[in-house]
Image (cartoon, rainbow, N blue to C red):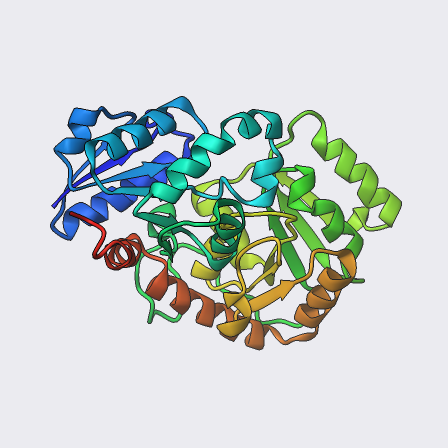
Amino acid sequence: MKILHVVPGLGDPANGIAAAATRLAEEQRALGGEVSVSPSCTVADCRLSDVVFVHSMWTPPVLRACHAALRAGTPLVRVPHGCLNPAALRHSAWKKALVSPIERHYMRRAACILVTTETEKAAVKRWVRGAQRLEVVGMGIDDLLTPDIPDIPDHPDIPDLPPKRTDDGPRSFLFVGRLHPLKGLDLLLAALPTDAFLRVIAPDVDGAWARYERLARRLGVADRVTFLGVKTGTEKLAEMRRADALVLPTHSENFGFAVAEALVVGTPAITTKGAPWEGLETHGCGWWTDVNAASLRAALEDCASRSRAELAEMGARGRAWMLSDFTWRACAERVQGATKGVIR
């Protein structure tokens, strides 16, 4: 089977969509497909393929690729990567409004639309109305962690990272992300329980640290909040490992890789219903709250009230869940199942 992935911005190392599409393509190749990845395509390219996956939305290369696939009569699979989530739609809304009629046409004519989560599926259904087939296939996270974290799910501890704390000292939470209003650090500062500490991994862009430090002082928590700057690789994972819980107090998130990273190193996570992590509760490895300070505070206090032994057990369940369901091989197998019957 010949599979073509069209990924605008393929050469940009900071392009998360390109990285995800490339990893999916690698695993499809390992499963026996003849797979190519390109930033664009022609009608002739599509005629040589059995299926065309077009990643992202809105841009001219995306629209041209959709047109080419449909003109060639090759099944078109759309992968929007969160482009239809409410917060994403509000960004440059007037530009998106101009091409929305064309995008809706191509989305409705796609043989299949693949999404990451049930939350994204609901957003796509609201916007498209009439999609032929809409399937949740998830995401892989294993490539984010290797070679720092070996794939040894039964190992009681994780080499090269600090052991989980077992004392009864004050609880320590960790925030990882941009200092952007949508990320909800203001909610977290307002919800921080008495005697708990917060460590923040985030870049200082346009004086954001100073703004949040002022907010922390106004809320009376400045002496319990530490801004660490940017941490990557093992340094970041070590901070996640030391924390009692990773907190992502987001207003809107298509996936939230920080949650997955924390779970892989055995740390529970707390996030809001602005992120698609309802599985934290069903798998017993964290909290999934409403998007407000009161709900977030209740989750933080519940976490702080639990013994570190119990938190370690929650983290272990989360790690097992990640290593079972959130690999690119598992994602590629779900894609294979989801597109069965639509590929010519």
The answer to whether residue 235 is above or below residue 9 is below
Image point 42% across, 65% down: which residue?
A: 319
Question: Is residue 187 left or right of 54 when viewed as pictured?
Answer: right
Image point 81% across, 44% down: which residue?
A: 216
Q: Nearer the viewer, residue 171 or 132?
A: 132
Question: Is residue 232 left or right of 17 when viewed as pictured?
Answer: right
Question: Is residue 261 left or right of 250 when viewed as pictured?
Answer: left
Residue 215 appears in view:
yes
Image point 55% across, 71% down: which residue?
A: 281
Residue 25, picture quadrant: top left
Q: Nearer the viewer, residue 114 or 128?
A: 128
Where residue 254 appears, as percent x and y from the top left, is 51, 48
Q: Count the marks: how many?
A: 0
Q: Nearer the viewer, residue 274 or 94?
A: 94
Where residue 29 appears, as percent x and y from the top left, is 16, 46
Where residue 262 appears, as percent x and y from the top left, is 50, 57
Where residue 306 appears, as percent x and y from the top left, is 65, 75
The answer to whether residue 28 is above or below residue 118 is above
Residue 157 appears in view:
no
